[in-house]
Image: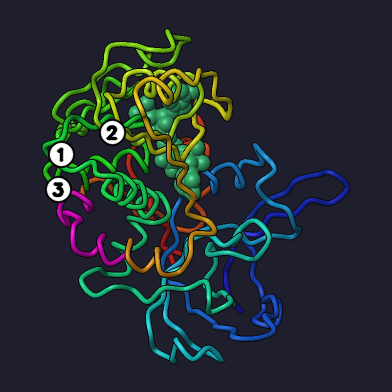
Amino acid sequence: MFRAILLSRINDQFSAGVAELEDSDLPVIATRAVKLSVEYSSLNYKDALALTNRSPVVRKWPMVPGIDAVGTVTESSHPGFSVGTTAVLNGWGAGEIHWGGLAQRACLDGDWLVPLPEGLTSLEAMAIGTAGYTAMLCVLALEDNGVNPGVGEILVTGASGGVGSIAILLLARLGYRVVASTGKSETHAYLKELGAQEIIDRATLAAPGKPLQKERFAGVVDSVGSHTLANACAQVRYAGVVTACGLAQGMDFPASVAPFILRGVKLIGVDSVMAPIARRVSAWQRLARDIDHRCLASLTQKIGLGESFGAAAALMAGTHHGRTVIDVNA
Ligand code: NDP
C-alpha cells in the first residue's frame, strides 16, 4: 500500500483527497518503465490549478497529480536507470495525462527522467522543481542569445513566485543586475535577499501601454504574460531578448510588432514540459553549479502530502511566495 493524492471526476463531480493505493493500481508503462520510491514532489502553478480544479489541467481521471518528483529507483527496465539511482521527473504530462509525483510511489517512462545531478540533494531538486528548472531554461535562452551579465538590466516578472524567485537567484548569482516586478510589497526584503537590485510595482506593467516605450532592459524573464509581457517587450532595448514562459496574468498577448521590427527585439518561448532530454540535463547541471544553496533553502517551505490542498489554495489566492516542497512520506 502507498499514500497518494487522488483527484477524481465522476458525473462532472470533482473530488480530491489522500488515498491508500495498492502497487497494482499504478499505471502500466509498456517499455523502459521505472518505478520510483518518491521522496519529494513540489507545488507548481499547474499543480495548484489541478488540486483546486481551477482549470482543465487534468485530462485523465482518476489522476495522481504532481508534475515533479524525485525518488529512488526500485525497479527498472530502462538501461539508463539502475535500482538505487536517484532520479528527477519534471513534466512530460505527469499529473495531467500520466500519474505524477504526489504519491509515495510512481511508475514512469524512464525516458522522462534525469539523474539527480551531483551537487544537489533530493530536497534541493524539488525546491527547484519545474519552476526553477524553467527559470534556468530562460537563463540559458538569454545566454544563447547573447544577453550576458554587463549587457544591461534584466526584468523578472512574477518575481515572488516560484519561477521568478529562482530566476532572480540564478541571475544575481551569475552577475546580472536584476529588476524584480512584484505585486506584493511585503516581499521586497525577500526579493532583495535573493539578489534583486531594484523592485518595481507590477501595476506599472499590468495595464495596456504604448507599443514602444523608453528602452530599458537588455533581457526579460516573464512568467506573467498578457499586458505585462506586452509592456516588457515595449521596454526592451535594441536587440534585447524576452523569454516568455508563463501566464499568471493571462494567456493573451495584447502587443504590437513594433519592438520586433523596429528594435530587433527577440521573443523566445520557453517550454519545460516537452523540452528534450539533452536540454534538461544541461539545465539541471547548470542548476547544480549555479544555485545558491543557502538562499534556495531560505525561499523554500516543506509540507506534508495532506497539506498540499491548503498550499495550492494559497498559491491560487496569491498569498504565497517562493517554493513549496511536498514530503510525500509525511
Ligand atoms: P507562482 O504562483 O509561484 O508565481 C506566479 C507569480 O505571478 C505570483 O507569485 C505573482 O508574483 C505573479 N502574479 C500572479 N497573478 C498575477 C496577475 N494577475 N498579474 C500579474 N502578476 C501576477 O507560479 P509559478 O512561478 O510556478 O509559475 C508562474 C507561471 O509560469 C505560471 O503561469 C505557470 O503556468 C508558468 N510556468 C510555465 C512553465 C513552462 O514550461 N512554460 C513551467 C513552469 C511554470 P508577484 O506577486 O511577485 O507579482
Cα–Cα gap, marks 1 and 3: 6 Å
Quarter of image, res 53: top right
Magenta stretch prevailing secondary structure? helix
Residue under the image location 39 percent in, 56 percent down: 129
- Label for residue 174? 3
- Label for residue 176? 1
**Render colour scheme:** rainbow
Quarter of image, res 239: top left
Q: Is residue 64 magenta?
A: no
For badge 3, the amino acid type reads Leu
- Residue where numbered disc 2 is placed: 219
**Cβ–Cβ under 8 Å for marks 1 and 2:** yes
Q: Which residues are magenta?
A: 284-297
**Cβ–Cβ under 8 Å for marks 1 and 3:** yes
Cα–Cα gap, marks 2 and 3: 14 Å
In percent of width and height, residue 76 lies at: 53, 90
For badge 1, the amino acid type reads Tyr
Cα–Cα gap, marks 1 and 2: 10 Å
